Image (cartoon, helix red, strand yellow):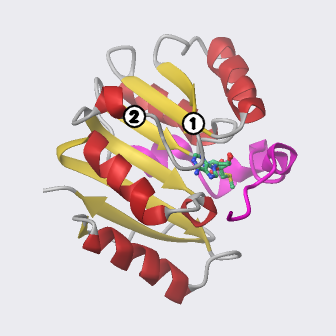
Amino acid sequence: MSHVCPWWFCYAFDNPLRRLVHDPVAMLRPYVRPGMTCLDLGCGMGYFTMGLARLTGPAGRVAAVDLQEKMLARLTRRAARAGLTGVIQPRRCAPDDLGLSDLAGAADFALCFWMLHEVPEPARFLAQVHAAMKPGGRLLVSEPKMHVKRDAFEAELELARAGGWALGERPAIWGSLSAVLTIA
Ligand SMILES: C[S@@+](CC[C@H](N)C(=O)[O-])C[C@H]1O[C@@H](n2cnc3c(N)ncnc32)[C@H](O)[C@@H]1O
């Protein structure tokens, strides 16, 4: 199985300094409108989940999915402190099953931030995300340059393309290789 970021390592990048390079609301505003259904896949401790929930507002929802209970426990505390419990749904998944069947065709926007390289079967993973999206829905994939070389990132995008995703813009995100995928 691929290497999975241990929960304690999340503090190395999920901290207040990160805001200087990754402002969640500013980064995600182009993709998210009030009332949308969003997915934060491999949400970790919820650094981006909180931004997504602020952008969807109380009329929207954010399914925040992760393998690790400790990540979700921290996210749950964060959501409660911010008064966003009604918007954020923390969900524990299995390595090969995101558990999104109840959201088939429901999601407007999905985020895979610094996580796809950790997924053991990326083609299967991308197919599950595809099934959860509305027509016209968008997926932002962002991988850390530190761990994922450009060739490996392009191979991930090729896998997505073969699975029915269309490649869109390549946003400039600090320390990352990023692309927006769309579903027709
Ligand atoms: C490097 S962390 C990034 C966390 C968060 N996206 C962020 O940017 O702060 C990667 C996360 O993906 C999760 N993850 C790894 N493989 C996964 C899988 N197959 N399904 C769901 N989550 C997974 C890990 O548990 C970890 O929380």
Q: Which residue is mark 2?
A: 100
Q: Residue furthest right?
A: 8
What secondary structure is marked by label 2? loop
Q: Quadrant of residue 56?
A: top left
Q: Which residue is mark 1?
A: 93
Task: Indicate whether residue 8 is drawn in magenta.
Answer: yes
Q: Position of residue 123 (x, y in %)?
A: 41, 64
Q: Earlier in the sequence, mark 1 or mark 2?
A: 1
Q: Toward which corner of the image does residue 49 lie, by quadrant?
A: top right
Left or right for 15, reference 20: right
Q: Nearer the viewer, residue 110 or 129?
A: 129
Badge 1 residue CB within 8 Å of ligand 1? yes
Give the residue at x 53% y 33%. Answer: 64
Res. 117 visible in picture? yes
Q: Could you give the CA–CA distance between mark 1 and mark 2, rounded to whole angstroms? A: 9 Å
Image location of residue 115, percent across then percent down: 59, 57
Q: How many marks?
A: 2
Secondary structure category for the residue under label 1: loop
User: Residue at the location (39% across, 14% down)?
Assistant: 58
Residue 5 among magenta residues? yes
Magenta highlight range: 1-29
